[in-house]
Image (cartoon, grey):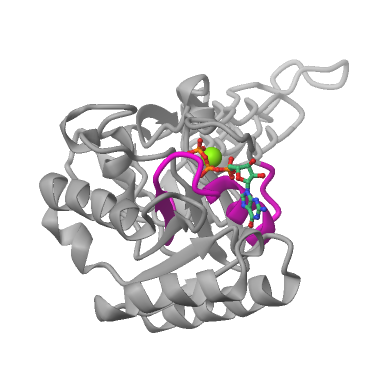
Amino acid sequence: MLVDSVTILVKAGDGGDGSASLLRNAMTSKGGPDGGNGGNGGNVYIQGSHNITDLSEFRYKKKIIAEGGVDGRGKKLFGKNAVHVTTTVPWGTKITDLDSGAIIEIGDTTTPILIAQGGIGGLGNVAFKSAQNQTPRYAQKGGKGQERHLLLDLRFIAQVGIVGLPNAGKSSLLAVLTQATPKIGNYPFTTLEPTVGMLGTYAIADVPGIIEGASTGRGLGTTFLKHIEKTKVLVHCIDITSEDPKKAYETIRREFETYNPELLKKPEIILLTKADVVDEKGLQHQIKLFQKLGKTVYSSSIHDTKGIEALKHVLTTMLSAS
Ligand SMILES: Nc1nc2c(ncn2[C@@H]2O[C@H](COP(=O)(O)OP(=O)(O)OP(=O)(O)O)[C@@H](O)[C@H]2O)c(=O)[nH]1
Ligand SMILES: [Mg+2]
């Protein structure tokens, strides 16, 4: 299941308490202070990644908690600082602090962003020793780690959306463009959830088949149209062996128009799939029909490696320009 919005709790570690120990051994009955400082609590960082494509892991991981610093002890022993925790989220995730309303956009994949600061370790009584007070009997408590309630929103499930009628060859295309291994079947609605694969740094989503009436809830309904809204470029797959490829194209475009006309403005690649099944004459005939609509149209076969490489090039060029 694709998860595109979750709330989580983030809690940095508390600082360890300082120690108020006084030295006691066989040599001294009235020893001076020897309490060490507490360690610092762990920070929580969030970092963007291109390798995660949705927020599903946060369905179970609702809390991200860093450990506290260790308390200081006698014999001037300092408590250990806790290790920091870094959580990765998909690139483009929008984080909203539910208490303050502050917004953080994860638009970078190399710099961890500090989300919750760990508490500072408390000072032990050694630190309070002075000329006036040789034997301080107090120590500081560790500071509290910051706690935040956050809403994570996936901004882009992908830069590219592969759309089309059921059985058009969308998942097969994703499998040859990327390393993804979606389920492929010679029947409609093989794909029930979007699958995302990576072409270089670009995420490509194979969206379940859209049918006439999808915009008003037929088939798998509007759930996936929502995801298409977030993509930059569409690859519209049309099965060249279908009875009327132009009609197939127009059916999907009508659903876009009903759902959100903005979808019609997205840069698109019209792709006649399964080109290996028809002869050259049949292919050219269909290409001309689309060209009459004033559209640029490409054809593909999953068995034509060269053609797929050329398509990758067209896609990456479009993406770098958009
Ligand atoms: N000959 C040939 N067959 C193809 C090609 N691309 C896909 N197919 C076949 O078409 C059928 C449907 O492919 P899928 O990739 O599952 O189609 P889909 O659009 O993802 O289908 P849904 O998920 O049901 O919407 C499968 O039997 C594929 O093997 C192609 O380029 N050439
Ligand atoms: Mg599919």
Quarter residue 250 falls in: bottom left
Where is residue 137 drawn, in percent x and y? 52, 22
Please, is residue 286 above or below residue 160 in the view?
below
Task: Report whether 45 appears left or right of 69.
Answer: left
Which residue is at 20% across, 46% downward? 255
Image x and y of residue 282, in percent: 52, 69
Q: Is residue 21 magenta?
A: no
Image vertical order of residue 318 relative to residue 251, above or below = below
Quarter residue 274 falls in: bottom right
Highlighted range, magenta: 157-181
Taking depth in this image into account, of 188 and 136 the one nearest to the observer is 188
Q: Can the viewer see residue 194 in this picture?
A: yes
Name the residue nearer the viewer: 65 or 160.
160
> Residue, x 60% and y 25% (percent of image)?
19
Residue 139 visible in the picture: no
Expressed as whole percent of the image width and height from the top left, the position of residue 291 reads 33, 80
The image position of residue 186, as x and y in percent, is 61, 35
The residue under the point 60% across, 31% down is 69
